[in-house]
Amino acid sequence: MEVRINDANFKQEVLDSNVAVLVDFWAEWCAPCRMVAPVVEEIAEEYEGRLKVCKLNVDEAPQTASRYGIMSIPTLMIFKNGEVVDKSVGVCFKAELEGWIQPEI
């Protein structure tokens, strides 16, 4: 299950999480974001309980997007213990994403 996050709940849902968190920074108008969305949804279902998956619409949460230097979307970031441990910018395939998140969970 994906969690919708924004500027108001980012700290609680991501930084204070006791499990690793994958954050998908996206926007409605972004075609590559729509390409990545089904992959992110699959990861959320398959890794439930081991990895929290959150979606942050950069148009609705500009402070958080700015704080993390989001210049291009989609940007995927993994947070662990409140810190960014890795990030990926652009479209990625499921196998690629799984290989990237495995060491962090």
Image (cartoon, rainbow, N blue to C red):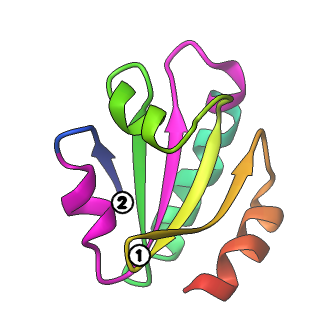
> Which residue in the rendered view is the most extreme toward the top?
29
Residue at image mark 1: 48
Q: Nearer the viewer, residue 74 or 65?
A: 65
- At a point 60% along the width and 83% down the height, the residue shown is 104
The quarter of the rendered structure image containing the N terminus is bottom left
Q: Secondary structure at mark 2?
A: loop
Tell me if residue 59 comes above or below residue 48 in the rendering. Answer: above
Q: Position of residue 41 (x, y in %)?
A: 52, 53
The quarter of the rendered structure image containing the C terminus is bottom right
Rendering quarter of residue 60: top left
In contact (CB < 8 Å): disc 1 and disc 2: yes
Q: Position of residue 96 (x, y in %)?
A: 82, 64
Q: Nearer the viewer, residue 67 or 80?
A: 67
Residue at image mark 2: 1
Q: Is residue 87 left or right of residue 81?
A: right
The three-letter code of the residue at mark 2 reads Met
The three-letter code of the residue at mark 1 reads Glu
**Magenta highlight range:** 9-33
Q: Marks 1/2: CA distance?
A: 7 Å
Q: Position of residue 6 (x, y in %)?
A: 27, 38
Q: Nearer the viewer, residue 42 or 96?
A: 96
Q: Is residue 67 left or right of residue 103?
A: left
Rendering quarter of residue 18: bottom left
Tell me if residue 67 comes above or below residue 47 in the rendering. Answer: above
- At a point 65% along the width and 31% down the height, the residue shown is 73
- At a point 39% along the width and 80% down the height, the residue shown is 81
Q: Position of residue 94 (x, y in %)?
A: 75, 60
Tell me if residue 2 comes above or below residue 104 in the rendering. Answer: above
Q: Secondary structure at mark 1?
A: loop
The disc placed on residue 73 is none
